Amino acid sequence: MRIDSLHPITSARLSVIDVDAPLRGAALSLSKPATGLVVVCHGNGQAAGVLSKSDIIRHLANSGPTEAPVATLMSRSIVSCGPDDDVHSVWQTMAARGLQNVPVLGADQKPIGVLDIRDAMKALFDQEELQEQLLANYIGGIGYQ
């Protein structure tokens, strides 16, 4: 199963902010339900970094200025995936690195979605359930339906 099969879900989770935007703008974006990651972009739309709720909390806990631009807080080394990547492989990477969300980037490095690890797990679980049902039907003599 490829990441692009989850496009309706990943595109709905996409939240983008400019590198020069203030921290407050990122906090407002992250306060929306189901938004766990904001993709920080240059003016040309290409991803420059990512910002999570944890990044903001860490910054504020260390008495960082609330007027700081998101560029000073964002993670510049982006762990991302593409629409042609395998969901299982991406899930393994996310689990190994302890990531809850990763941006889905197109070939031009512009964000097209955000994959949440729970969505990846649900898709993989659904796929396994389907395979199990097909196998049970085959063994039971019902055939493929």
Image (spheres, grey):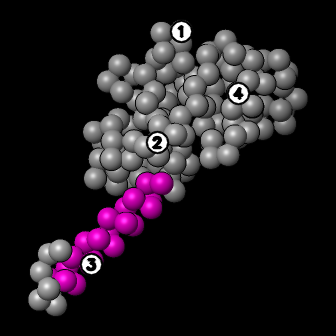
- Of the residues tagged 4 and 2, which is closer to the observer? 2
User: What's the mark number on residue 43?
Assistant: 1
Mark 3 surroundings: few (<14), some (14-19) or many (≥20) residues within 10 A: some
Q: Which of marks 2 and 3 is nearer the N terminus?
A: 2
Q: Where is residue 55 in the image (x, y as percent from the top left)?
A: 70, 35
Q: Tag 3: residue type?
A: Gln
Q: Tag 4: residue type?
A: Ala
Q: At x 29% / y 71%, what residue is drawn?
A: 130
Magenta-span inclusion, residue 38: no
Dot 2 corresponds to which residue? 10
Dot 3 corresponds to which residue? 133
- Say whether residue 14 is left or right of residue 54: left
Distance between the alpha carbons at the discs numbered 4 and 2: 19 Å
Q: Which of marks 4 and 1 is nearer the N terminus?
A: 4
SS under mark 3: helix
Mark 1 surroundings: few (<14), some (14-19) or many (≥20) residues within 10 A: few
Q: Give the range drawn in magenta.
A: 119-138
- Say whether residue 139 is left or right of residue 48: left
Mark 4 surroundings: few (<14), some (14-19) or many (≥20) residues within 10 A: many
Q: Which of marks 4 and 3 is nearer the N terminus?
A: 4
